Image (spheres, grey):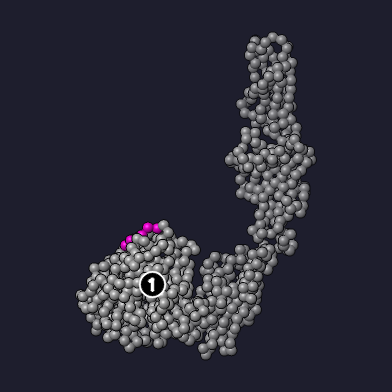
Amino acid sequence: MKQLRQIAGLVLCVAAPAATTTYWELNSYADFVKGRLEGTSLARDGRLRLAPKAETLFTAEQPVIWSMARGLRGTVYLATGHLGQVYRVDGAGKSELVWTAPEPEVFAIAVDGKGVLYAGTSPDGKVYRIEAGKAVEYFAPQTRYIWSLAIAADGSLYVGTGDGGKIFRVTAAGTGEVWYESGQSHVTALALDGQGRLLAGTEPNGILYRVTGKEKAFVLYDASLPEIRAIVPTADGGMYVAALGGAFGTKPAGAAGAVSAIGAGAVVATTPTSITVEAAQQAQAGIEIKPQAQQAKTASTPAVSSSIVSTPIVDLTGVEKAALYRIQADNMVETLWSSKEENIYDIAPSGQSVLFSTDGQGRVYRLEADRKATLLVETREGEATRLLPTPEGVLAATSHAGKLLRIGTAPADAGSFESPVHDASSTARWGRIRFVGDVPQGTKLVLRTRSGNAAKPDATWSEWSEPMAASDTVIASPNARYIQWKAEFTGAGGRTPELDQVTIAYLPQNTAPVVKSVTVASQAAAAAVAKAASGPASPNSVYTVTVSDSGDAGTSAAGTPSQTVSRPQSGQLVITWQAEDADGDRLAYAIAFRGEEEREWKTLKTNWTELALTLEGDAFADGRYRFRVVASDAVSNPAAQAREGEMVSAPVLIDNTPPLVKTVTRRSGAGIEIEATAEDGASVVKRAEYSLDAGPFFPLSVEDGVADSLVERFRARLENVAAGEHLLVIRGFDSAGNSGVAKVVLR
């Protein structure tokens, strides 16, 4: 039913005419996820409710928390960047700076059974052993990065490194050996399963290994994404695996790129948290146990060194960006969740469900057994980088401010949701706001609205309205183009109100239609223009002038020239125009004309629905005329809301009369002097020519040099005219193409 309501709402928004009530409705996960959640969660079925209470335990005031590890007696250690600091935080939120590394980044930490802390630093990666507040260098693998650490039951320490993609096994201070060479650039994640076997994730091929001994490994999964980000074994012998990095054409190793650009103790402004090096995924035809890093899953982008920082990120729209996999004990793999918009960073099993964190406003999701993901908490931070289950709740570490949050199980006391901004396309009159939900006794759910004419809410918008508790209330916000609503939730005794659907009714302001151009031509000219538009222009193409709504004529000359229309052979004139309506309303037209010396418009047609009108040319005497086209949307709107738009053509000169030609001739020596006068009552005389004895026509010279008036004199001298009788024909043309002819018999 919700889908049906949603479809109906969309149909109303799209198909309704301008002056008809329109509805903006939000009722699904896809609708609500575009808004801003503050202390609220969003279920996959599109239901908003109060989120589990999330409290800030600690703020490192560092750009990012890279890693978390649980210590003894409920303490938690945090590794940060870009000052290389490690903190200890107890269950009450009391914090202590444990150690500041000589290197700027601490990407990985681990705590052994005795509470001894190990920290891996970068660049020029080293492992430090921290005990009783004192840190000593424990192992230096001679690699650039240390991405991951894992402690085995026997106390040995596994170290995942880059750029060489090697795993080291360290058994004592300074004593370590290469345990496995992956052939990849980076070993990004390490974990130990219930049988003590080492699990390793790599980049840039996104390969997951089970390492069973020195230089012995089995590929559990070759992901279609470049980076294995997190591995969490489960009690049944399976595991959850997070992979990311598939929506970028070229991206340097986030943490690695940050390190390569800075020195020890320096601070960078940005906080990239992905260590993806390669482009979008492309499945390999087959894999080896040690595939080389240059075989990365990239459609066309070459491998990029992690030391490059300035390479631009190219987003490949529609490419899978991240995924959460469940690998069973028998090695069968299923994809539980994937996204084309968000990167996944960490995983934390929670009872029968699993939590995972992303970079979408620092979100934490809960995935139930039915594979339906609930947006549990939106931290409003850049990324939720790490998750750590504790008896008191799940801890979430974030970037930007380097915060540590504790997410409980009971709902928060209060929260809110801000909808995305809705564009009504024009100034709208707001109607009623209605919502559907469940408000248990003792809880409270109210809505507020605000509006404005800027695309993003700012100081020019109205204040939030007074709270509206009724499910059907008239909106009090001022009429404007944009509107937004906010729902405020108040819980009681562990109960929370729920919101399923919100609908706003509004009446958009009707937009006036626009007449874009008006063209007047003879029927022959109109046909010639149409032919010219479909093919190369011929030398004999008829000249027409089209006036557009920008005031530009169809010629390159400055200003708007008058259009001259000659007497059509068919006796008809054609007026054509273009018009549009932003609301999609049906239009009707009224066409009128007015002579140059006239005061009032004379109507030719009303309620005309076509974009052309043909007239009898003989209905207009010689002279200048203007034609007006008025477009109206009254056929789609009530009379009170109907709007009009109009355009008047450039002056159109109609000339049906040829010029009067008079000639004077006299003999001069062996030649003949010709003088001709051409006079027209409507249009300018353009040229004159002569023919002798039915021969070809030759031009006459204009006496004053320029043919630009209603009366023009022309001259010519004919040399060496033979004796006898001759027929001389003089032909004069006006600007409309009409020709007048005179003849003289020479003896």
- The amino acid type found where label 1 is placed reads Leu
Magenta region includes residue 303: yes
Say whether residue 145 is left or right of residue 655.
left
Image coordinates for residue 739, horizontal then vertical, percent: 72, 29
Image coordinates for residue 79, horizontal then vertical, percent: 32, 76
Q: Nearer the viewer, residue 157 or 334?
A: 334
* Residue at the bottom extreme, as displayed: 493
Name the quadrant containing residue 21: bottom right
Say whether residue 615 is left or right of residue 340.
right
Say whether residue 212 is left or right of residue 429.
left
Name the quadrant containing residue 144: bottom left
Question: Which region shows up in magenta?
Answer: 301-307
Q: Is residue 273 visible?
A: no
Q: Is residue 164 visible?
A: yes
Q: Which residue corresponds to mark 1?
A: 220
Please report the residue visible at 70 percent of the width from the left and 34 percent of the height from the top.
Answer: 736
Magenta region includes residue 390: no
Say whether residue 140 is left or right of residue 704.
left
Q: Look at the picture and state if 744 lies above or below 560.
A: above
Please report the residue visible at 38 percent of the width from the left and 75 percent of the height from the top.
Answer: 231
Image coordinates for residue 497, horizontal then vertical, percent: 56, 84
Q: Quadrant of the N terminus?
A: bottom right
* Residue at the left extreme, as displayed: 174
Name the quadrant containing residue 685: top right
Magenta: main secondary structure equals loop
Image coordinates for residue 210, horizontal then vertical, percent: 35, 74
Q: Which element type, helix, strand or loop, lies under badge 1?
A: strand
